[in-house]
Image (spheres, grey):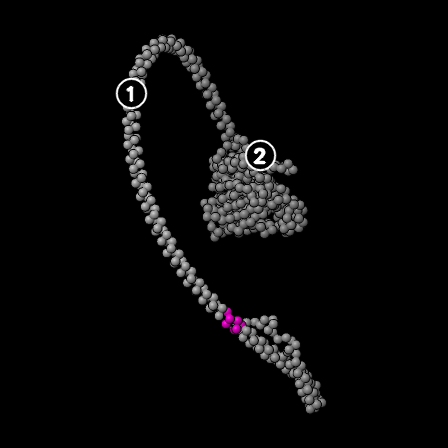
């Protein structure tokens, strides 16, 4: 394969011009001669054929001339390159010879320097050995002299100390005898005084013992009365929790019925304004159902929704978005194809809904909340990042303590801390783990680890119902007929007009269509409203409700 010609090696059009001109002139002469020689009836055909042949002959001559000139230029370029290669080979041989000579010179110098240093090192070693021997002899003589002197000083000091000890021992014996007589006299006086004090103290303690006996009888009666009051208070608390759980179950059933009625009306009405109002009521009813589920979780009752099949993680997130008011500002970035087991899907969805609601409520009204999903060996990590208020150290510790689920008491819970307790109990029940960290978007980030115990492989065919606008919705409704959309439709989605504060990409939409309740690919969830106490606690990712202070220009969230 030959290399392409350089721009300077290509023949110039001016050098090719004489060849086609000469060929055209000869062809023209031939055509004219042929026109005069043939009969008049064939002149036109001969002229046309000759003109075409002349054009083709000119093109062929031009191509041939271009090829000849290109070959000549290539041959000239090859000769120049061959000369350059020869020069380069000569230069490389010269450089190799110089490098060899330099290496030999440096090797010789290194050998001579090594020999010189070895000789100097041997001389220095001999000198140091002689100096060390002389110093050792001097130190040995000095040590012997010091030993003899210290022995003499030790004998003198021992004799002096023996004399001092004998004199001190005699003096201490005389002082001890005097002090012994004095202590004996003081002990006799003290014994008499102690006997009198003991008699007085015994009388006082006897009176105090009688008084303590009376107090013991009084405290025993008081303890019995307080025990009875505590037993009554415990009974009242249990009754209140049972009544609250019963009320939560009735609220769940009412929300379920309202959702079913709204779905029926959405299937019945096709007017865009009416359908928009119905979808708004549908979304608000879903939020009321979440509040009822929160009350049920806090009182120990089960959720009103249970699923028989696994739910995909993306459907879990979409279902959580459908239960909060600020769903339009949630952005989900999920590439995970794992699914949550049916028995835990509702709890994970509810906990994530509390998290997303908290992040949306404590962010600016136009700020977005981003949700990322990452698969790790321990399970699936769901990260919620907002750009709202930053939590202080004390608030962060209070939030982490609330979502840990260590305390199951309801005392001290306020409206802004209700979501923390709900997420904590759900997390403890399903083994979720939560941690807080500063968000790269300027707010607070929450990491939720969904353990492998409640996950199923991607090939388990998780259920992901398709709802309005083509979005997948998690199985978060009690019946297929009352299926709540994962991201509720809005009037803007019906009319194509962007809603205030909503991104333009969410404005476009189509009229939602409900699928039939008997669709074969939609799961039929197991529904029940249980008010009995489960006794399960919760730990996990608290929504952070109450851990941050809402700005003054908008109301504080309910924390539900």
Residue at (58% x, 76% y) in the render: 73
Is the C terminus in the top left, top right, bottom left or bottom right quadrant?
Answer: top right
Q: In this view, does 201 lie to the left or right of 395?
A: left
Q: Residue 465 versus residue 358: which sits nearer the camera?
A: 358
Kindly give the residue lying farthest to the right in the view shown: 40
- The answer to whether residue 170 shows anywhere in this view is yes
Q: Residue 454 versus residue 91: which sits nearer the camera?
A: 91
> Residue 37 in the image: x percent, y percent?
69, 91
The quarter holding residue 325 reads top right
Task: Give the CA separation, mark 2 to mark 1.
Answer: 90 Å
Q: Name the residue under label 1.
A: 163
Q: Residue 63 versus residue 556: which sits nearer the camera?
A: 63
Residue at (67% x, 81% y) in the render: 21
| Kind of element beneath mark 2 | loop
- The answer to whether residue 266 shows anywhere in this view is no
Magenta segment boundaries in residue numbering: 81-88
Q: Name the residue under label 2.
A: 415
Residue at (59% x, 71% y) in the render: 6
Q: In this view, does 195 lie to the left or right of 13?
A: left
Q: Is residue 431 left or right of residue 56?
A: left
Q: How many labels does the image show?
A: 2
Magenta-drawn stretch, dominant element (helix, strand or loop) = helix
Q: How crowded is mark 2: few (under 14 residues within 10 Å), some or many (20 or more)?
A: few
> Residue 345 in the image: x percent, y percent?
51, 44
Tell me, yes or no, whether the highlighted magenta stretch contains residue 182: no
> Residue 469 in the image: x percent, y percent?
60, 51
Residue at (55% x, 51% y) in the render: 519
């Amino acid at each position: 394969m030959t290399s392409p010609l350089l721009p300077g090696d290509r023949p110039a059009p001016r050098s090719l011009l004489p060849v086609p001109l000469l060929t055209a002139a000869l062809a023209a002469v031939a055509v004219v001669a042929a026109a005069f020689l043939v009969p008049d009836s064939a002149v036109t055909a001969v002229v046309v054929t000759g003109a075409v042949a002349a054009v083709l002959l000119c093109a062929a001559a031009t191509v041939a001339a271009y090829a000849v000139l290109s070959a000549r230029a290539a041959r000239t370029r090859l000769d120049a390159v061959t000369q350059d290669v020869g020069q380069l080979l000569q230069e490389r041989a010269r450089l190799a010879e110089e490098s060899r000579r330099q290496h030999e010179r440096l090797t010789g110098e290194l050998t001579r320097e090594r020999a010189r240093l070895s000789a100097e090192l041997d001389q220095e070693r001999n000198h140091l050995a002689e100096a060390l021997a002389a110093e050792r002899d001097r130190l040995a003589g000095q040590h012997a002299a010091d030993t003899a002197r210290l022995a003499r000083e030790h004998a003198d000091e021992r004799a002096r100390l023996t004399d001092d000890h004998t004199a001190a021992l005699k003096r201490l014996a005389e002082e001890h005898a005097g002090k012994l007589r004095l202590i004996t006299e003081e002990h006799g006086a003290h014994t008499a005084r102690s006997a009198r004090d003991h008699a007085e103290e015994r009388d006082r303690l006897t009176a105090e013992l009688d008084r303590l006996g009376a107090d013991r009888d009084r405290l025993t009666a008081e303890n019995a009365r307080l025990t009875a009051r505590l037993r009554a208070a415990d009974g009242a608390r249990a009754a209140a929790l049972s009544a609250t759980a019963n009320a939560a179950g009735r609220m769940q059933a009412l929300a379920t019925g309202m959702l079913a009625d709204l779905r029926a009306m959405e299937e019945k009405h096709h007017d865009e304004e009416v359908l928009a109002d119905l979808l708004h009521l549908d979304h608000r009813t879903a939020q009321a159902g979440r509040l009822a589920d929160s009350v049920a979780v806090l009182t120990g009752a089960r959720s009103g929704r249970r699923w028989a099949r696994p739910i995909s993680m993306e459907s879990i997130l979409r279902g959580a978005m459908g239960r909060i008011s600020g769903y339009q500002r949630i952005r989900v970035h999920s590439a995970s194809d794992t699914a949550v087991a049916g028995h835990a899907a509702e709890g994970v969805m509810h906990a994530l809904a509390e998290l997303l609601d908290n992040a949306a409520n404590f962010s600016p009204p136009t700020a977005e909340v981003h949700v990322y999903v990452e698969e790790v060996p321990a399970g699936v990590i769901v990260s919620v990042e907002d750009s709202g208020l930053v939590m202080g150290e004390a608030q962060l510790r209070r939030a982490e303590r609330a979502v840990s689920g260590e305390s199951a008491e309801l005392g001290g819970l306020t409206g802004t801390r209700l979501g923390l307790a709900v997420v904590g109990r759900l997390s403890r029940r399903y083994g979720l783990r939560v941690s807080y960290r500063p968000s790269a978007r300027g707010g607070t980030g929450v990491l939720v680890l969904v353990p492998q115990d409640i996950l199923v492989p991607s090939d388990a065919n998780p259920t992901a119902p398709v709802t309005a606008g083509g979005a997948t919705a998690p199985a978060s409704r009690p019946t297929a007929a009352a299926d709540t959309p994962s991201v509720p439709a809005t009037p803007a989605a019906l009319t194509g007009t962007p809603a205030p504060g909503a991104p333009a990409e969410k404005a476009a939409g189509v009229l939602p269509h409900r699928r039939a309740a008997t669709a074969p690919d939609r799961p039929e969830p197991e529904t029940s409203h249980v008010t009995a106490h489960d006794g399960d606690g919760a730990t996990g990712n608290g929504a952070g409700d109450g851990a941050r202070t809402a700005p003054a220009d908008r109301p504080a969230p309910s924390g539900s």
